[in-house]
Image (cartoon, rainbow, N blue to C red):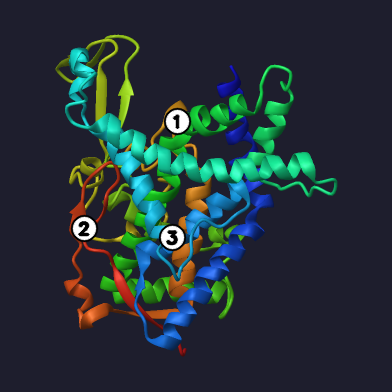
Amino acid sequence: MANGLIFVNCAKNKFSSERLNASQGHRQEKLQQLCNYVDGCCINGEAVDIGEAAFTTILNILSNTLFSVDFGNYESNSSQELKEIISGVVDTIAKPNLSDFFPVLRAIDPLGIRRQTKFYFGKLLQKFEEIIRQRLQEREKSLAYLRRNDLLEVLLDLTQQQKSEWGIEEIKHLLLAQFLLETLQDFFLAAFDTTSSTVEWAIAELLRNSEKIERARSEIREIIGRGKLVQESQIFALPYLQAIIKEVFRLYPPATTISRYYEADIVIGQYIVPKNALVLVNLWAIGRDSSLWSSPDSFVPERFLDSEIDVKGQHFELLPFGTGRRMCLGMPLADRFIHSTVASLIHNFDWKIEGGIKPEDVDMSEKLGVTMQKAVPLKAIPTRTTV
């Protein structure tokens, strides 16, 4: 019961339109930090790992939403270390486990999945425990305690409502184990792997299509002006930018498949799908289906101009966040972040591929897993635009 209450509060308190609008200034601050980092690379002539920079930005947005602290640093390996931990957790969860099919093997853990899970969760939980312990000490000992506007504050308030039943260990268990385990896949996976990889795919496609990046840049400058960050409230006025992101979602869905269980027998075509069968929906194949899309393997954002198709789960030909009651919890935040980040990276910066690689020669091969990432990270050298 407590799990459900906290999970509902997570969605209600942090991903509603009202709360996201209220916290827009915080995300703008993190985007400004990203632009400052890119500016520094312009001065030094250094390449930017687009996916890594996007990951660090969303990591800090989410870690501040949760704990009011930055987890990542553009100038260090701290972001990469946490990315490896999160990727390790996700990959381990997704691996087929013989022990699930043959319970007698659980004791010996033949594939080492239990050991890997314990290792990665231990690393992540240790990080969270340090933050929670420090916050509890501040709340208990400081007479002038300044409340944070983050999720941890909400969770601690909820646990204190049942203080007579829960001690510190129970609070830690609830916050670090139950909450994390229940929400990790929807919350962290959606926030980190999917959003950062989508930004990387978008910039890669735009660099390979110079006329499209110029059209997007012109649109942004006409509406926003030079030298300004795109506000989330202005995204609706940028239809070509929206079309670009939809086209990226079509070609490179963050999760290649979504799964559903049917509550009753159902007939699909000539097949009977029995009750409780696990059905995998191939989003990658839908996005490249020639019966649904013309030139399905080409990057054509124009197909979404004057189109009613959106990504909110109502149009089954484009379901990057899923559909129905099990839609991605972080969709409202991810949608805002991706648009504003891509706009920030192309608004005032030109890009050249590291190593003198021609745009048309950029490696666009995919590394398939739970999420679809570029097999070869996109590294590009930025310069300030002059016109």
Badge 1 local density, few (<14 within 10 Å), some, or many (20+)? few
Q: Which mark, residue 375?
A: 2
Name the amino acid, label 1.
Leu
Q: Residue 184's spot in the image, x, y percent?
A: 44, 36
Q: Quadrant of residue 230?
A: bottom right
Tell me whether circle 2 and circle 3 mark residues in contact (CB < 8 Å): no
What is the distance, in whole Å, between disc 2 and disc 3 at their CAs?
Answer: 22 Å
Q: Residue at x 42, y 55 (%)?
A: 306
Kindly report the distance in space between the C-alpha atoms of the residues bearing marks 1 and 3. Answer: 23 Å
* On screen, residue 206 above or below 92: below
Name the spot of residue 186 as percent of width and height, x first: 44, 36
At mark 2, the secondary structure is loop
Disc 3 residue type (three-letter): Ser
Residue at figure coordinates x 20%, y 42% from the top left: 285
Task: Categorize mark 2 by other alpha carbons within 10 Å: few (<14), some (14-19), many (20+).
Answer: few
Q: Which residue is mark 1?
A: 181
In the image, which is nearer the foreground, mark 1 or mark 3? 3
Which residue position is annotated with label 3?
78
Tag 2: residue type? Ala
